Image: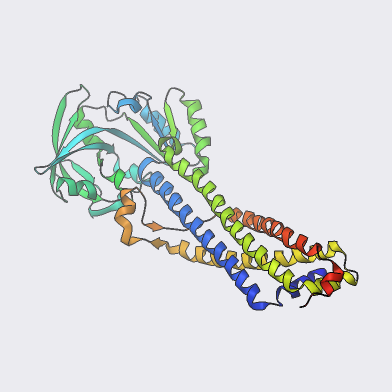
């Protein structure tokens, strides 16, 4: 009975109730969509970093992390690769020869990180092969060793597909040597900070140039089927190879994990602000409603409705106003996020700015299903707290005085 009365009371002033509900719906919709957009930026950054740059796990000798020189190679690299390939959950393994070098043309020069890779196994770990925008990914033969450079570096060196680039590098004896490479292709990822210094060559060509044992590696990168299995796989490898440095993606790039955690806190902080604003709006509406119904409330109490029922009625009216608005806002946000997450939102006009900071301009809004549950809980709590002041105001009415109140 009280529920039916409260529901009818909400719609007695249809326009006012609809305005309050719409305000709540738009506030929640805007908040959820902004949270989904922010989550999409972070999730996309993490996914791009893992699949194009760092992989899920990297294995090195501890000394290699200090100076990145060829002398710190893993002697048992082939065995490590074979063992890793047999571990459940690992999608791909790529053994690399990685070190610092200088790339130069007749126009310019730049310091680079040279990655000696097996082109086929690298495809299993990174998406560099799919990022080639000009030329080829180590296809065909060439008189000179082939090199893959980024569009950013190509612009700095004034190079293009087919151009010759001189690579100056230290060999295994510590002597400076140089060799001529021909640009086979130019790639571009969403992270200009990664693109500019990283170049890729065949590991056999780099080993021949530097005198490095082609069976060894300075880095082994592992890509997993599921990011959630990272810690379990790291623990397994550390048990097998306790003397090696086995780093998960969030240790290699700690800012990625920090951004993810910070975004979770930001989401709830923003939500609390919006719900607080909604609560003040609903309190104001309910106070106006009680003022207009002073005589009616007095008559209800005079004919026997106790204060507990009056309190519950006011609380239910507040919950209905908040709940309907929240449900509409959640439905709007769910549909919008679902639609935009399929094809993403392309901020092409600001692509250079995004990529200069290491972010993709194509964003796929995403939000966790559990977030909707906690939102519903917070809306109910907010509505209950917002109802207390108007309900107390109604309970303070003197029935006799309220009946004489001029409506």
Q: Nearer the viewer, residue 279 or 115?
A: 279
Q: Is residue 385 left or right of residue 262?
A: right
Q: Is residue 346 left or right of residue 87?
A: left
Instruction: Point out residue 8 in the picture as x, y percentages from the top left corner.
Output: 75, 75
| Residue pictured at 27% horizontal, 30% vertical | 214
Q: Is residue 41 left or right of residue 267?
A: left
Q: Nearer the viewer, residue 107 or 139?
A: 107
Instruction: Point out residue 94 in the picture as x, y percentages from the top left corner.
Output: 36, 38
Q: Nearer the viewer, residue 135 or 312?
A: 312
Q: Nearer the viewer, residue 340 or 128?
A: 340
> Where, quadrant-wise, is the N terminus in this rendering?
bottom right
Give the colour scheme shown: rainbow
Residue extending farthest to the right is 304
| Residue pictured at 16% horizontal, 27% vertical | 176
Instruction: Point out residue 316 in the picture as x, y percentages from the top left corner.
Output: 75, 65
Q: Quadrant of residue 179?
A: top left
| Residue pictured at 57% horizontal, 54% vertical | 273
| Residue pictured at 42% horizontal, 25% vertical | 244
Whether residue 84 is visible here, answered yes or no, is yes
Looking at the image, residue 404 lies above or below residue 231 = below
Looking at the image, residue 111 lies above or below residue 310 = above
Please state the total of marks drawn on the protein image: 0
Instruction: Point out residue 382 in the picture as x, y percentages from the top left corner.
Output: 67, 57
């Amino acid at each position: 009975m009280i529920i039916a009365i409260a529901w009818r009371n909400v719609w007695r002033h249809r326009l006012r109730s609809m305005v309050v509900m719409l305000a709540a719906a738009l506030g929640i919709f805007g908040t959820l969509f902004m949270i989904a957009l922010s989550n999409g930026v972070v999730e996309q950054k993490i996914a791009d970093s893992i699949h194009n740059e760092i992989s899920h796990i990297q294995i090195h000798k501890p000394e290699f992390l200090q100076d990145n020189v060829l002398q710190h190679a893993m002697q048992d690299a082939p065995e490590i690769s074979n063992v890793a390939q047999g571990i459940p959950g690992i999608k791909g393994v790529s053994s690399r020869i990685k070190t610092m070098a200088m790339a130069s043309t007749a126009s310019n020069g730049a310091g680079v990180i040279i990655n000696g890779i097996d082109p086929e196994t690298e495809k299993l770990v990174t998406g560099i092969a799919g990022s080639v925008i000009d030329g080829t990914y180590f296809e065909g033969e060439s008189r000179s060793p082939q090199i893959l450079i980024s569009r950013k570096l190509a612009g700095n060196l004034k190079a293009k597909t087919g151009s010759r680039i001189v690579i100056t590098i230290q060999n295994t004896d510590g002597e400076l040597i140089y060799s001529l490479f021909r640009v086979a292709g130019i790639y571009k990822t969403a992270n200009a900070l990664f693109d500019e210094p990283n170049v890729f060559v065949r590991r056999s060509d780099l080993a021949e140039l530097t005198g490095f044992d082609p069976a060894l590696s300075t880095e082994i990168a592992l890509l997993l089927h599921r990011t959630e299995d990272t810690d379990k796989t790291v623990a397994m490898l550390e048990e097998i190879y306790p003397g090696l440095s086995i780093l998960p993606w969030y240790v290699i790039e700690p800012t990625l994990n920090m951004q993810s955690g910070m975004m979770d806190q930001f989401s709830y902080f923003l939500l609390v602000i919006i719900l607080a604003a909604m609560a003040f709006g609903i309190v104001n509406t309910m106070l106006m409603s009680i003022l207009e119904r002073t005589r009616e409330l007095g008559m209800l109490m005079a004919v026997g409705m106790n204060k507990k029922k009056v309190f519950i009625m006011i609380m239910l009216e507040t919950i209905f106003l908040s709940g309907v608005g929240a449900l509409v806002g959640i439905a709007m946000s769910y549909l919008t996020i679902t639609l935009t997450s399929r094809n993403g939102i392309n901020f092409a006009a600001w692509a250079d700015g995004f990529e200069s900071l290491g972010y993709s301009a194509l964003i796929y809004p995403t939000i966790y299903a559990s977030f909707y549950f906690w939102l519903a809980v917070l809306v109910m709590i907010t509505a209950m707290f917002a109802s207390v002041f108007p309900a107390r105001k109604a309970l303070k009415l003197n029935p006799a005085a309220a009946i004489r109140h001029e409506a």
